[in-house]
Image: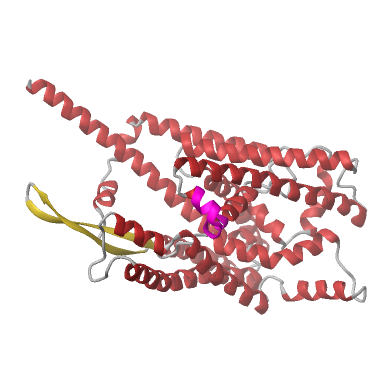
């Protein structure tokens, strides 16, 4: 059954949208910030020869850089100043979040409230700078190695000055995107970091769809298969929407209180999402599986018989290709593992049970304290099984189609998950702003009527 807030949100009068001045300002600010991000994705790093970047894209095709390139809207392929996007910030925030759950010192800082949150955010920024600097240096040396191995000078003047300039530019670009995302969250609509990632994915979708239709026109792909792909994508989007809104609502009851209508018991619900981990499990599993292939591509393709290390890298390249049985098996196992691991980090049954006990809440039929904690763990484990299976299905089916039918990489399950999740969250926030505006109009009308009655 839908909640009262959901019922009011569905009955909103969209004709009020034109009168919601504050919401329009927020939307225009969000749109302008995303345009700035897209413009920066075409500003190249200093000292780069743009004509040789096509070779880098071919050399790293199928690796983890190709995976992250879809999130940056092609900025990594063009080697722009925002080539790394916001992925270092996301990685740093996940590491800090995991550390705050495992380290007693960081856990104590987390419990300090707003001041603790600011300190953890500062640690996240420091981690972002460090990660971006390391990744920027690896990219700079990789570009120089590309020119040496392939006979194409990707860097105009290789050397220490180029590496320093590239690292400074990449750190500045990533930190600017991080600041831009925070500004969108504060002054715009939706989560800024998520919107930047979604903008990068959506920006490259027209080209991907064009390539898909062009393959049907040239005869390299059956038109019936193209129609089936479009239908499958639409069904996947609907399925993702359904599963992302699915939740297990646990009834919470509070002690009876005296009200104007007599003695009544207050009740509420604790919603547990079916997919608590979000899109983190597919991103982590893909990154770990594609890391050996990417290291090989940066270092140059090894030759057989050059030693046990070269033979090991060749074997990894053969077994971890997209669509191979071992890759699919490890990918699914990684998604399931990270689903349970990250869910355990995000939701703490012991802390939730203690908070309920502190405020006098309890689950009917379950004693407060340890029994409530066990019940939360029992319910969370079982819904996570369904959530992990859903993530594995969403990610493995497109992966199989990519390998067997040559569908563009951008149409993978992870990209669809991000686009659908961010879109749903942004629409929900727009509805909240419209609802607040509608409430404001009702309050003004009530004040006017009260003034006239006097």
Q: Nearer the viewer, residue 165 or 356?
A: 356
Q: Residue furthest bottom?
A: 325
| Relative side of 46 to 173, left or right | right
Q: Residue at x 31, y 58 (%)?
A: 356
Residue 101 colored magenta?
A: yes
Q: State how the image is colored.
A: secondary structure
Image quarter (top left, top right, bottom left or bottom right) of the C terminus: top left
Q: Where is residue 323, by image quadrant? A: bottom right
| Relative side of 256 to 236, left or right | left
The location of residue 358, given as percent across then percent down, is 30, 55
Q: Nearer the viewer, residue 97 or 185?
A: 97
The location of residue 155, given as percent across then percent down, is 87, 44
Q: Residue at x 64, y 61 (%)?
A: 409
Task: Please give the range of residues in magenta.
Answer: 98-109
Q: Residue at x 45, y 64 (%)?
A: 275
User: Looking at the image, is 215 positioned above or below residue 8?
Assistant: below
User: Looking at the image, is 19 positioned above or below residue 416?
Assistant: above
Q: Nearer the viewer, residue 309 or 17?
A: 309
Image quarter (top left, top right, bottom left or bottom right) of the N terminus: bottom left
Q: Is residue 119 visible?
A: yes
| Relative side of 65 to 104, left or right | right
Residue 454 colored magenta?
A: no
Q: Nearer the viewer, residue 360 or 70?
A: 360
Identify the main secondary structure in magenta.
Answer: helix
Q: Residue at x 29, y 65 (%)?
A: 368
The location of residue 9, given as percent across then percent down, is 29, 47
| Relative side of 377 to 212, left or right | left
Q: Is residue 44 visible?
A: no
How many circles with numbers are drawn on the protein? 0
The location of residue 81, given as percent across then percent down, is 72, 40
User: Looking at the image, is 386 positioned above or below residue 440?
Assistant: below
């Amino acid at each position: 059954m839908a909640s009262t807030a959901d019922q009011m949100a569905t009955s909103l009068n969209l004709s009020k949208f034109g009168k919601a001045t504050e919401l329009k300002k927020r939307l225009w600010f969000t749109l302008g910030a995303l345009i700035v991000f897209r413009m920066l994705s075409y500003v190249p790093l200093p000292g780069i020869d743009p004509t040789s970047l096509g070779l880098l894209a071919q050399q790293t095709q199928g690796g983890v850089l190709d995976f992250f390139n879809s999130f940056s809207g092609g900025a990594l392929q063009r080697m722009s100043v925002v080539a790394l996007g916001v992925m270092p910030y996301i990685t740093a925030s996940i590491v800090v979040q995991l550390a705050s759950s495992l380290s007693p010192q960081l856990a104590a800082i987390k419990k300090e409230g707003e001041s603790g949150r600011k300190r953890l955010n500062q640690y996240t920024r420091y981690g972002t700078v460090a990660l971006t600097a390391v990744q920027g240096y690896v990219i700079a040396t990789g570009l120089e190695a590309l020119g040496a191995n392939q006979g194409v000078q990707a860097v105009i003047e290789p050397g220490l000055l180029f590496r320093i300039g590239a690292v400074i530019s990449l750190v500045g670009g990533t930190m600017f995107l991080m600041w831009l995302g925070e500004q969108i969250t504060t002054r715009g609509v939706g989560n800024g970091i998520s919107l930047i990632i979604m903008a990068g994915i959506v920006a490259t979708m027209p080209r991907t769809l064009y390539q898909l239709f062009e393959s049907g026109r040239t005869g390299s792909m059956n038109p019936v298969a193209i129609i089936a792909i479009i239908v499958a994508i639409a069904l996947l989007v609907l399925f993702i929407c359904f599963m992302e809104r699915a939740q297990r609502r646990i009834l919470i009851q509070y002690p009876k209180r005296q009200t104007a209508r007599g003695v009544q018991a207050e009740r509420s619900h604790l919603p547990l999402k079916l997919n608590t981990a979000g899109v983190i499990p597919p991103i982590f599993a893909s990154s770990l599986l594609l890391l050996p292939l990417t290291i090989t591509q940066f270092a140059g393709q090894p030759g057989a018989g050059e030693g046990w290390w070269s033979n090991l890298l060749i074997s990894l390249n053969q077994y971890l290709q997209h669509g191979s049985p071992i890759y699919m098996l490890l990918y699914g196992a990684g998604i399931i593992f990270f689903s349970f691991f990250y869910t355990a980090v995000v939701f703490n049954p012991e802390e939730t049970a203690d908070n309920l006990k502190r405020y006098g809440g309890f689950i009917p039929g379950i004693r407060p304290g340890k029994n409530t904690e066990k019940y939360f763990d029992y319910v969370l484990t079982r819904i996570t099984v369904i959530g992990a299976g859903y993530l594995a299905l969403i990610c493995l089916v497109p992966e199989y189609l990519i390998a067997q039918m040559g569908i563009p990489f951008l149409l993978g399950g992870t990209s669809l998950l991000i686009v659908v999740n961010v879109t749903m969250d942004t629409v929900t926030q727009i509805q909240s702003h419209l609802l607040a505006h509608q409430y404001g109009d009702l309050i003004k009308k009530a004040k006017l009527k009260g003034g006239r009655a006097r």
